[in-house]
Image (spheres, rainbow, N blue to C red):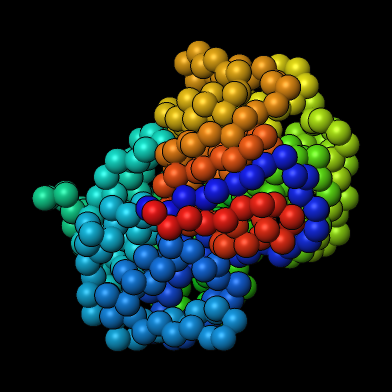
Amino acid sequence: MDSLVIDGGIPLNGEIRVSGAKNAALPILCAGILTAGSLQVRNVPHLRDVTTMLTLLTQMGMEVSLDEHLGVCLSAAALHNRVAPYELVKTMRASILVLGPLLARFGEARVSLPGGCAIGLRPVDQHIKGLEAMGATISIDSGYIHARAERLRGQHIVFDLVTVTGTENLMMAAALADGLTLLDNAAREPEVVDLAECLNAMGARITGQGTGSIRIEGVANLGGASHRVMPDRIETGTFLAAAAATGGEILLKDARVDLLEAVVDKLREAGAFIESGPDWIRLRAQGRPRSVNARTAPYPAFPTDMQAQFMALNSVALGTAVMTETVFENRFMHVQELIRLGAEIEVEGNTAIIRGAGGLSGATVMATDLRASAGLVIAGLVAAGTTVVDRVYHLDRGYECIEEKLSKLGARIRRQRN
């Protein structure tokens, strides 16, 4: 397994480009199942999860081609296999997003249950409940979801809890259903909005995206389209947090500040100076950061996917911070690794108390999930001496060429093949 070796203590300075959003690209690639036409998806990030999704779609019979700019052209005209096998689904939970499109267009789907997750339970019961309400017959056998429906019918569905992938799956299914579908208590994340905009470009009739109530008028079929994936707001936030923690100054291009206002507010509270335009963000740190409290919650509140990065920042900040995790029940696994670097953190249930240390010291640490990996990298950038972050295959699932981008900003970081 690869590791990242970081010689810390250097402020980040310079400019880099933000990649397309993984969490927007994955459902948009699945939307290609809904049409016999050609779907061209631009600004697709080069990530392990994207490769896994394209492998799954290709195995189903979708024609996939890449252009010289890493854009993807999809054609499901000859798609023949309605099965998403465990071998692929187990490596990426987003594979469940093929369920709604397969059922809506072909009337059947067989999709493996995603299984467990290191950061907590993420059940698919809301997906199943919604599709059953729309007329699907669903059974679970031998670890697979078997779904059938002659044609889905529009329905008023109220989610028991806010679920991003559940909202996306039912929104795609409803696009080809008979009649009107209303999704209440829907996820408001920008990635949901990006998917809706792609579907509308294909001929869907969706309104209300970005609010808690989404309205979908089903159509008989969808056509081809071209869509550019939105910038990755979590990658944006990660680099901003890294610059703030190291006391640097960076310019992020192809970035949108409106996608992460809660994160930007916390960075300003930490003492960073931030200015922005339509497609760029500049951050300048002003000395050692100040501690900031944060409580994770669904969008537009502070994202759970930025919790680990801010815990690393708070580990070297002035003062004491309280961070509360409300989204996932097991997302503090990076705490013990940060403590190995010298952080002073106490965990009480779903709350972590972080007392800013005068400095961190390099050590070997182990990544446990995608965002924990990013938090450990930030800590390594700040720490004196050398930090080795093991098991960075997690990082490769969500960050495109992270060591190359950090190197452009002056970091001393390299990948070590173990």
Residue furthest out toward the front: 385
Quadrant in the picture for residue 176: bottom left
Foreground of the two, 364 or 80: 364
Residue 98 position in % (x across, y down) = 34, 63
Q: Is residue 37 above or below residue 81?
A: below
Position of 291 with respect to 69 (left or right) is: right
Position of 370 with respect to 293 (left or right) is: left
- Residue at (39% x, 72% y) in the render: 54
Residue 299 visible in rendering? no
Q: Quadrant of the C terminus?
A: bottom left
Residue 159 position in % (x across, y down) = 44, 41
Foreground of the two, 145 or 286: 286
- Residue at (49% x, 30% y) in the render: 337
Q: Is residue 359 above or below residue 211?
A: above
Foreground of the two, 247 or 189: 247
User: Across the whole image, how many numbered discs are drawn on residues?
Assistant: 0
Residue 6 position in % (x across, y down) = 60, 46
Position of 237 with respect to 269 (left or right) is: left
Q: Is residue 278 above or below residue 76?
A: above
Quadrant in the picture for residue 321: top right
- Residue at (60% x, 18% y) in the render: 344
Quadrant in the picture for residue 121: top left
Residue 247 visible in rendering? yes
- Residue at (84% x, 40% y) in the render: 285
Foreground of the two, 182 or 274: 274
Position of 266 with respect to 140 (left or right) is: right
Residue 230 position in % (x across, y down) = 64, 64
Q: Is residue 221 above or below residue 199?
A: below
